[in-house]
Amino acid sequence: MRFFGMPDIHDEESLNAFYKKLLDQVPDIIFKMVWKTDNLYSLVYVSESVNDVYEISVETAMYNSAFFFEERLFPEDAEQFIATMEHSKDTLTDWKYEYRVELPKKGLRWMRVAAHPELEKDGTISFYGRVSDITEQKEHERRLKISEERFKYALRAASEGIWDWDMTNNTVYFSGQSMGIIGTEEEAIVPLDFWRERMHPDDIKQHELSRKAHLSGEAPYFESIYRVKNNKGKYRWVLSRGKVVAYDNDKPIRAIGTHKDITLLKEKEIELANTINIIGSQNNRLSNFAHIVSHNLRSHAGNLKMLIDIFKQAKEEEKEEMFKQLEAISDGLYVTIIHLKELVDIQFEVKIVKEKLNLRHYLKNILNILHNEIRKHGVDIEINIPLDLTVNYNPAYLESVLLNFTTNAIKYSSSERKPMLSYDFEMIDGQKVLSISDNGLGIDLKKHGNSLFGMYKTFHKNQNARGIGLFITKNQVEAMGGRIEVFSEVNKGTTFKIYFNEDN
């Protein structure tokens, strides 16, 4: 391929004609306007594009400059259009303005004028500029704005914020909605550690595992639920979701995601879990009551009915013995019903009244009640409780707890040694604790530890053991907000520690 030298334009056409043809090919309107010293202005040149853009001829535009600059302007934009043009003329700064025009065929259109003013030697000012039809651009901007507003309002309605992680610089952009979770509603670009340092320590490990699983390609996206501390020092629950959106040679460099404050949802979830636990506890209690009815009441009732049927056919000399049996069955039925009432009182009493009670005084009352039993078994009693010590407790429950543990210690004393029973008080981590210790038969905790406080659980072959005393005692202590610990060794003795809850 050979190139020829530049031909002389003057060989075929004038230079002005050459430029005119070039300018007429530009889709924008190219114009020159002269502003004279008498404050009149006129177009001295306008390109052929004015036919398509403004829907007027070149001749009309040149003949009537006002038609070009004023008459087709949208009324709301006319005043500002003239004001910006005059400001450009007065300050000799570039004129840039976006405005609307009303066209016969195309209707309402958006235009942008851009012109540069120059001061001539004769005092006139020449504007060299262009007018562009930007209607499609404006429509695109409008749709984009609507889309952004929809997205913004949708995020607000869903209580969601945006985070944008720049992995190269290890900084994160947080939207105002995200920052609002921690109490600051202004968007910010901060180091990655800014957010991570606010996370609950117990949640960081799982968060890191979820993040690494996504970055390594094991998971298609990132999702984590964790707690973050706000500016008031309280934790809020957050659901964070995201995805890597940019790579550099397969190395992730940018990730974008959302934050959602799910504190209320979490609180409802916890409340639901507590409700389920309550229902489960109630079902367990119902099961225990069903156990009493099915095994004890039914047994007593069956024996009673059978004995009455036999009594009807018995001889006179046999009836006296049967009365004794009826009396024994009646006593057993009465005790079972009393136990059932105690359980109902413990489990379903809404509010149990507490009082400041002298612990040593109540213990003395119990020992007086059991005086004959203590004397009969020759039990040595040792009391190590301050005379003025009080506990915040329900009187009936305190009597019942002390009575049950004392009678159990006497009932399960060892025949191989003189029974010993001690009551000791101590403070453990600021909590009042009463220890009741004996040197009796003891309990194999490895074998029976899990069922020690179960209903109808007995651990020695004592004919008077019903297996309900410890169950009732444990429920009474827990109803008072306390707890029981047990230490025992077979054939050496047992210690029960009762922890008192002093809160009202």
Image (cartoon, grey):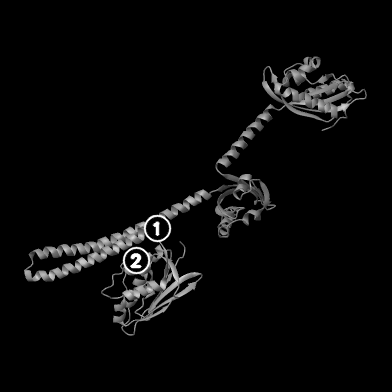
C-beta proximity under 8 Å, tags 1 and 2: no
Task: Give the SS element for disc 1.
Answer: loop
**Residue 89 on image: x %, y %:** 84, 26
Residue drawn at x 44%, y 54% is 273
Report, in whole angstroms, how far the alpha carbon at label 1 lies from the one at label 2. Answer: 18 Å
Closer to us: 43 or 362: 362
Residue type at mark 1: give it. Lys
Residue bearing the label numbered 2: 472
Q: Is residue 139 visible?
A: yes
Q: Give the mark toward the camera: 1 or 2.
A: 1
**Does residue 404 lie above or below 241 as drawn?**
below
Give the number of the disc on residue 351. Answer: 1
Give the number of the disc on residue 251. Answer: none
User: Position of 399 compared to 299: left or right?
Assistant: right
**Does residue 24 lie above or below 430 as drawn?**
above
Q: Quadrant of residue 175?
A: top right
Q: Quadrant of residue 62?
A: top right
Closer to us: 128 or 313: 313
**Residue 94 on image: x %, y %:** 82, 30
Q: Residue furthest bottom?
A: 417
**Residue 494 on image: x %, y %:** 38, 77
Residue type at mark 2: give it. Ile
Q: Quadrant of residue 113?
A: top right
